[in-house]
Amino acid sequence: MKSVTPAKLKKGDEIRIIAPAKSFKASFTEERMVTAMKRFEEMGLKVSFGKYLYERNEFESTTIEHRLEDLHDAFSDNNVKGILTVLGGSTSNQLLKYIDYDLISNNPKISCGLSDITSLANAIHAKTGLVTYSGPHFTLFGANKAIDYTVDYFKQCFFTNESINIRASKYFCNSRWDDKEIPNDGMWAINHGEAQGKVLGGNMVTFNLLQGSNYFPDISDSIIFIEDNAKESIRAFENHLQSLIHQSNFSKVMGLVIGRFQEGTGMTKELLTKIVQTKKELTNLPVIANVDFGHTTPMITFPIGGECKIVAKDGPQIEITKH
């Protein structure tokens, strides 16, 4: 299926905030809300909110019907030019069977989120060809640390058509509300080589939930971006990676880009290198790791269904060529 790139944003455009997974948390204070809103105002964007954003049940979410209504309303409203999720969670894959994919195809627009939203983003791309985006949730714009890098790549992806060269951040924080600044030692070239292809992926656990369904995108000729959070152990990451490798057309994957691991995982460059280099299927695949996306901050925004080039060597290079 041919990829469809949505129109870019411009000043004065409206962004709709929805909650297809977790609902808005009370812990997102008024101060953080003011900070987030100010950052969108500085970008020249107006913000509106889904009808059921604050509705919560025992699963920290709301009904499938209400989440679908907010999703469909955001795509059908001609005033809305972009859609941003408020949080991740664990329930967005409940929506996939009930989404009106024709509505989305007929109203292509930017949609962005990360973590659990990976299933929604990749499924929409698989069913419609629409390029979706892995990037910051709305709440992340309320953070105080490491935000300039995040905003910069958000703007590059959504306001321009120019190629984006990924540069490593100078420091990172272990989570969005963590104020401890950790020096960043840059991207790692785990397996050397060069590749170009279609970008897919996001959070690996959530991406793998789509396996075996018609919501899982064709990974042929792709460069897969994957990351895990601190809830996943090193052994779990290796198992999830192996599950991805077991896909029938994995031999047609062109490269891997791995996001930065949170400190709680215990992952190191040496351990990751051993995991990658003991898997024969990855021997000839360029692999770059410790890239600024995932559950640490700051983060890039990247297009699911877009295109990129990678050069895995000393001084690794990643260029998003179509987004």
Image: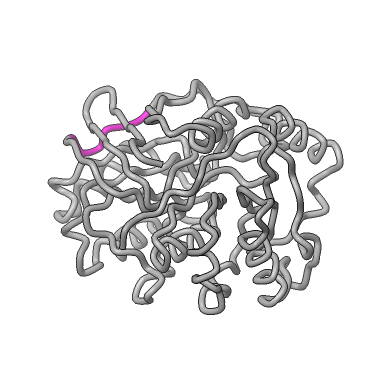
**Which residue is depicted at the point 43% across and 46% down?**
303
Q: In the figure, is residue 180 to the left or right of 252?
A: right
Q: In the figure, is residue 60 to the left or right of 107?
A: right
Q: In the figure, is residue 96 to the left or right of 58?
A: left
**Which residue is depicted at the point 79% across and 46% down?**
28
Could you say which is closer to the camera, residue 176 or residue 51?
51
Q: Quadrant of residue 189?
A: top left
Q: In the figure, is residue 131 to the left or right of 151?
A: left
Colour mode? one colour
Tell me where residue 232 appears, x and y as whole percent. 48, 56
Residue 276 in sight here:
yes
**Which residue is depicted at the point 39% across and 65% down?**
126
**Which residue is depicted at the point 66% across and 30% down?**
43
Quadrant occupied by the N terminus: bottom left
Could you say which is closer to the camera, residue 7 or residue 320?
7
Tell me where residue 283 appears, x and y as whole percent. 14, 47
Q: In the image, is residue 6 part of the stretch drawn in magenta? A: no
- Which segment is the magenta one? 187-192
Residue 234 in sight here:
no
Against 105, is 318 above or below?
Answer: above
Q: How many marks?
A: 0
Quadrant occupied by the C terminus: top left
Q: Quadrant of residue 312?
A: top left
Residue that lies at the very extreme toward the right in this rendered image: 30
Q: Quadrant of residue 249?
A: bottom left
Identify the main secondary structure in magenta.
strand
Tell me where residue 151 appears, x and y as whole percent. 59, 31
